[in-house]
Every structure is written in C-alpha cells, then in structure tokens.
Image (cartoon, coloured by chain):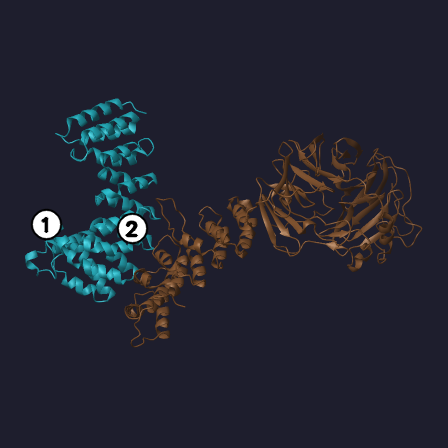
Chain colours: A cyan, B brown
Amino acid sequence: MRFFSCIAIAALATTLASGSASAQKPTDKPADKKDRKTAGANAGAPPPIDVKPIVAKLKSGDEGQIKDALDEARLAGPAGAAAAPTLAELLTRGASLPLTQAAIETLGDLESETGSAALAQYAVHRNAKVRRAAVKSLTRTKGAAATAAMKHALSDSDAVVRGTAASGLGALKAKDAVPDLFVALDHRVNEAAASIGQLCSVEQCEQLAAKLGRVPLDVMTSGLDQVLFRPAADINDDAKVKIIGRIREQGTLEGNKFLKDVQKRWPAGSSPRVRQAIDQAVMATAGGK
Amino acid sequence: MSFVGTHRCLARVAIAASAALSLSLALGTASCAGDSSRPSTFSTNWLDDQGKSIAEVQARLKNAPPGGNADLVLAVAGAKNDKLIGMPLSSSSAAGSNWTFQHPLDARPIIAGGVVVGSGNGEVFALDTATGKRLWARPTGGLALLGAGDDGTITAVTLSRGTGSTILVVGRDGSVKRQIETDKAVGDPAVVAGVLLVPWQNQYVSAIDAATGDELGRVTLRDKVSRADKIGGAVYFGEVAYVRFDDKIRMASQGGANRIGIPPRELPGTPRLFVPGTEKLPAVANARDRDRLFARPSSPEGPLGIDSNRFYATYFRLVLGFEATRGQLGWVHTHASDVIGGDAVQGGVLLCDEEGKVVVLDGRTGQVSFQSSFGEPIKSCVAHADTYKALPGPGGAGSLAQQIAEAVSSREASLATGQRLLLRELGTLEDESATKTLIEIASDSRAAPILVTDARAAIATRRNGTSYMLTALGKHYDFLRDVLASPPVGPIADALAAMKEPKGAPLLASHLLDPADNDDDVRRAAAALATLATKDELPTVRHFFTMYRGTAENDDVGQAVASAGEALLRLDPKDGRALVEQAAKDPTTVAIARTRLEALLTAAPDKPGGDKPADKPAK
C-alpha cells in the first residue's frame, strides 16, 4: 500500500517537475538572486514552476488549503523555490503544530536560502520533533542563518538534533565550525567525526587522527575516510600517509578491515604514494588483534 | 524467694539470696510496715502527699556530698563489640590517657558517677571511670541492663526482668548491699548519699534508702519520667525535659517544680532528648543514635535554664545548634562522618563519630573547639560531663547561610530530611548569599529532586540577592559546555517580578526561547515579562507569541502565550494589538491562549490614538 503511495507521489512529482516548463506559465516571481545562482550552478536543477496557486492557498488562512499547498510545494521541490518566502511568512506568523511541521519540511524541500531565517527560529522550538525537522531542513536551505542555527543546535538537549546539526555543518561546508565539531565529538556526538573529516585543515585532520584509540574506530573511520578521499589539493599526501600510519599503529583487525575497504575503493590513478602506504598497512595489520 | 508484706505492700522487696541471680544477700524486711506517712515501696495505692515526703528527702540530701563526678567519653569498639575505650576529659588540657577494657557486651555501657557500668556474658560489672580498672562484677542471669546510679560509695543498677525490674545495690567491694525486685518497670536511677532515686511507671520517682530498702518519699511528676541523672552537681528527673531535684520538687505534682525543656520546633527526623530509661540500649549504635537531641540544664541552683541557651540536634553528619528559648537555628556543623553519640557539656556539645573521632563544638558558634580520637572506628559512644567545659571556638565562623550551603551540598540520600529543613531555614534568612545557595541547589542536576523542589519554592519567595538571580538567568542549558541543567527560571521570574526588577527582562526573554527550560519555567517567565518587558524585549516576545500560539502543547505554554500577548498589548498598542486580535480569532491558536487573549482584549479595549508604546515595565 505504502509502496503504491510512493509511486503515486513519485508520478505526481515527475509530472510537476517535468511538467513541461513550456506548458506552464512563467513563475509568479522570478527566483531570487541566490536561487538563480544555485540553479545556475546546478545544471540539473528543474526549471521553476508557477507557484501562484500555491502562494494563494498558503495565504488563504484555511488549514485545508494550506495543507494542499504544502503538499504541492513539496512535490515541486526546488522548482517551487519561489514559494519559499510565503512559506517562511507562514511560519513566522505561526500555525498549528501539524501545519508547522509540514511547513518546515516543505521549506527544506524547496532548498531556498530564503527559508533559512524562519527555519532557524524553529530550531529552538520546545518540541524536539520540530527542532529535528528544522535542523534537517536547514541542511538543505543552507546560508549563514542555517550555519549559525546548526552551530547552536550542537548544544541541544536532544541527541538527534545534535547529530543532525553535526552532519549538517559538514554538508554546509562550515569550516569555521570545526572547533565546535571537535568539542561535539569529545561529547560523543559521533556524527561530528564525518563532518570534521570533510572540513578539516591538515592540522585539524591530524588532530582528528590523534583521537584514534580514544574514540571508537567505527566513529573515527567515518571521519578519516572523508579525509583520505579528499582531493590532494585540499589534503596533501603527507597528511594522508600519516593518518594511514596511525591506523596501522593501532594494529587492530577492525583497522585492517577499514584499510582493506579503502584499498578497494582507492581511485585508480590517485596518489601512488598513498596507495603504497595503504597496501603496506593492510599487510601489516592482517594479523591484528 | 521473696515475700509480700502484710500492709498491702505490692512491691516485692527481696533481700534474700536469689538462686536465679546467684547473689549472696542478707535477709531483711521490706519497708511495708511502720510509718504510714511514707509510701510502701513502689505501691500504687499511694495518695499524693503534696510533696511532703519528697521535700523531707530533699532536705535531708540537700547538703550531701555529690558523690563521684565523671568527665568521660566511652566507646564500644572491636570486631566483636567487646572493647571499651574510655577517654577521660579535662577542661585544662586535651583528653587524658585513654584506657581500654575487654569484655563481651550485651548493652550500651553507662557512666554513673565515678563508675562505668557494663553488662555482658551473664554479668554486670563496674569500672573506674578514671582508669578503666575493674571494680567488681556480679552475675545477672542474663537480665538486661537498663540504668545505673552511683554516689561514690554504692552503685545502683537496674535490670529488666521482662514485665518487672530488679534493682541491685552494690558496694565498691562488689558486695551486694540490697536487691529489690518489683513488678514495676523502673528506669535509670540516681544515688545520692545512700538514697536511691528511682523513676518508675513513667510518673513517679521514689526515694529508697539503700540501707533499709524503705521508700523514704515519692514525687509525682507531670512530665513523663524514666531517668534520674546527676549532672554538674544536681539531680534531674525526666525523659522529655529536666526537672531539678531541689527545694521546689515538693510542688512537682502541681507543676511547680523547676523544669526546663526545649521549645517545640521542627527538627530533622524525630530526635529524642533521652531514650526512655526503661529501654535497653544495644551495645552497637542504631539509627536512633544518629538522630538525637542534646541539652544540658544550666546550673544546680538558681533559675533553671538550658546551658549556653543552646540545644543541639544531630542528624547523621549534620549537627544543628538552636537558641534554647525560641528554638531559632543558630549554626550548622557538617561533620565528616555520622555522629553516633555525645552529650551536652558546659558551653557546648561533645560528639563522637563512627570513625572514632571526638569533637567538642562551641555552643555559641558551632566551631570545633577540641578534637581527639579513640584511635579506631567505634560502634557506639556515651559521654558524661559533670565539670568539663567546652573551650570557645577559634572565631571566624562563616555565616549561617554559608554553613547551610555546606550542609546541603552533600549528595548523601540519608541527609535529605535534614537538608530539607535547612533549606527552609535558608529561605527565611535575610542574607543575600542564601539566595545564591538556593539557586545553586535548584540548578544542580545531581541534587536530590526533593531538594530542588524545595529550593525552587524558596527562591520564589526571596526578595533579595537580585545579582545572583540575574547571574543565574545568564546561564542556559549547553550540552557542549557541560551545563546540563537550566537555572530555576520560573522561581527567579516570580521573585524578580515581585521586586519589579527591570534588569531581569532581557534575561527572562532569552529563556522564553530556550527549549531546555521546563514548561513551568516558561509560563512563569512569560508571566513576569507581562509586567517587566520593555520595547527591547518586544522582538523576542513577538517571536515566542507567534511560534507557540498554535503549537503550544500544554497549558503552561498556552498560558505563557497569553502572557506574551499581554506584554504585546502593553508594549505595542498598535501592531501588537493587531497581532493579538488576529491570534484570538484564529482557530489554530490553542484554546487556552485564545480564551485568555479574548479576555485581555475585552479588558483593555482599543483606544483611539492609544498607540503609544510603553517603554517602561508596567507598574
């Protein structure tokens, strides 16, 4: 049953998304500068849709119509980004709890930075589910407001919110959040490891690797894996070889398993020096503890 | 073995060889015949003689030598509870040399005059208080030791026989001078110049001539009485209070005797001034020994009061000093380990703990003025001080608020009852640091929940310590900075609102948007902001109002929304009012908020031109 619902939604989404842009009227308002910039950068982004009907329903004040509008906007996804300001206004004005949750998720689906400020307000809502949804959506809407809200959310009392924020900061490429992410990792926000791996400088990556043996290996590898596969221009071979050396020093079977996995995925043509270090480390840790 | 006299003599005064006790006794007669003005020993058909007979006894004993004095702390120790350690006390120096005596014990030993009386292994024995040297021992047939009195020449020992009692009078040489058996439950006796003063049946004290066994006089007390004790040269009767054996004792049955008790007040646990003299105390201290009252009568003559005008309560590790007239808490001493015994001494209180430490606290300040040790952990402790005086403390004692803060900082569950009482005391102090301590407890995630509740209630009633309140409000839950408990926002909000403290407004507003604060705190913060908020807080209040008007999940937050609406109406008569009106009409606004908002709008109808925003807190 659920499978069929999914198909139905997917079909509707396809209709709305492909919805032949030519067949549609021009949008109510052109997407804002940032949206256009994003759209330009992302060649595969769907063309904007006409959000006038959605906006009208959102402004109707009728709960049923607003709900419909939210469904339509969600299905439109980033193509309906022009509805984001109205949706943000709805959140700023306040609505019932189910509508609020739906609006937050929809704003995330629209992936418009214009929604970030309103979403950030709900990242401190008393209901943890609302906060989780807000932080999750902020990961998609991005921008300075999103980064600030997610940094704040690292200290949330809810573990899911903390974890989502930690992951989100990596996705947002919030390099200035790395010190906070280290503190989070020290407080067992394990999701912070992967984000640190995505964002760390050479020194910070070293700092992360130094936690081997003190932080569970599966948590560590989620971050070190990110570091090892970052471009050489970002993280040099020396740093990567050092990290491999640290894992090798651990001499564990778990480490061996991870290194083997890295060995398998190591892109052909990538640094032969790092490759050699991986190969040697795999052999050295084969009889690990 | 014994006989009942022909003059309705109900007590069986046996002066016979007791096979059961294996005592060698001379035969004699009970004082049941002869002088009809005197009561028959322990008779219950005696008519109160309005103090006549006891007055005669008192007159006879008035100038009698006090008998042996004792200044001694005595501990039961050893793996098998078979070691007695005596610590003689001296006011001029520290404790004298400790002595030890090995003997199985089946009851708490007693310090009586110049002797220590103990029992165990089927015998009762006496030791010299100064040296611990054994003076004598007599078989008991296993009867339980209840009490003992001594006048320096003879020792009277009371033993329980189930439904009745045996009084054994023993000379210094160990010879039994008299054995009195009665079906009455007698208490702890005193002996003065050969006269036994024996409390019995919780209401009488009989004066019995040890030489003849005759009851010389009797007094009926209006207090429950099961103990007669010599303290500092005078004899006192009582159990719940001290009744002095002086020339006013003749008026005791009319309530005219010199009597002093401690004022009724709330105390930690249910401490007793005395254990009933009819109750056998185990050799090893129990829970009741950790919950005691100590007070000492002021002087053997003149007006009777409580020494140093202080009485003391112990509750596990806590020692509380109270003013004796009205019962006000004067000081609190937090001890390192559980106090299991002690005695009020002149100028203070002597206490021993389960680690074997002995301390004397200055009655005025609660400071330690003397400390010593038995040198090993102990099982129980008794003390008696006839002449010993506590030295004054070193001075510089912290404030009562600081002392309470230290006492309540311990997280031992056993102390919670005492700590709750102290928190209530703290709440009544004018000292600003009391506010600080209450906030610290209420913010401590590891504090006992009941203490947190009490501290929160006390904070709400504080009217000083504003700076501590504002500092506390500056803190928020912060997982990464290990701040895992929110401050007591609600109670502080109540207090700041009552004090009309405008500095609280921005801080309270920041807590409106802190999801880690509990619902009650948010409700109270919003209520305070309804009167304290200024234009500066308007954006936060508006944010809160709009975010929760439709998403409030309980009445507390719903009421907070209404309070925020109240602030909006006051601060922003134009736009704020429009927002409130809109929310009041909107069916998605939660019911509890909508009802209150409608009421607010009705109570404050829109005034034409009334759009001047208030930039000051409401009066």
Please name the residue that numbered disc 2 is placed on. Answer: A132
Q: How many labels does the image show?
A: 2
B125 versus B328 height, above or below: above
Q: Which chain letter goes with mark 2?
A: A
The residues bearing labels 1 and 2 have C-alpha atoms spaced at a distance of 30 Å
Q: Do the residues labelled 1 and 2 touch (CB within 8 Å)?
A: no
Q: Label 2: how many residues lie within 10 Å, few (<14), some (14-19) or many (20+)?
A: many
Q: Is residue B555 visible?
A: no
Q: Residue at the left extreme?
A: A22
| Residue occupying the point 34% across, 75% down | B605
Please name the residue that numbered disc 1 is placed on. Answer: A40
B307 versus B551 height, above or below: above
Q: Is mark 1 on a helix, strand or loop?
A: helix
B565 versus A74 height, above or below: below
Indicate the quadrant containing the C terminus of chain B: top left, top right, bottom left or bottom right. Answer: bottom left
List x then y, in percent, for residue B79.
64, 31
Which residue type carries mark 1?
Gly
Q: In this view, does B43 lie to the left or right of B573?
A: right
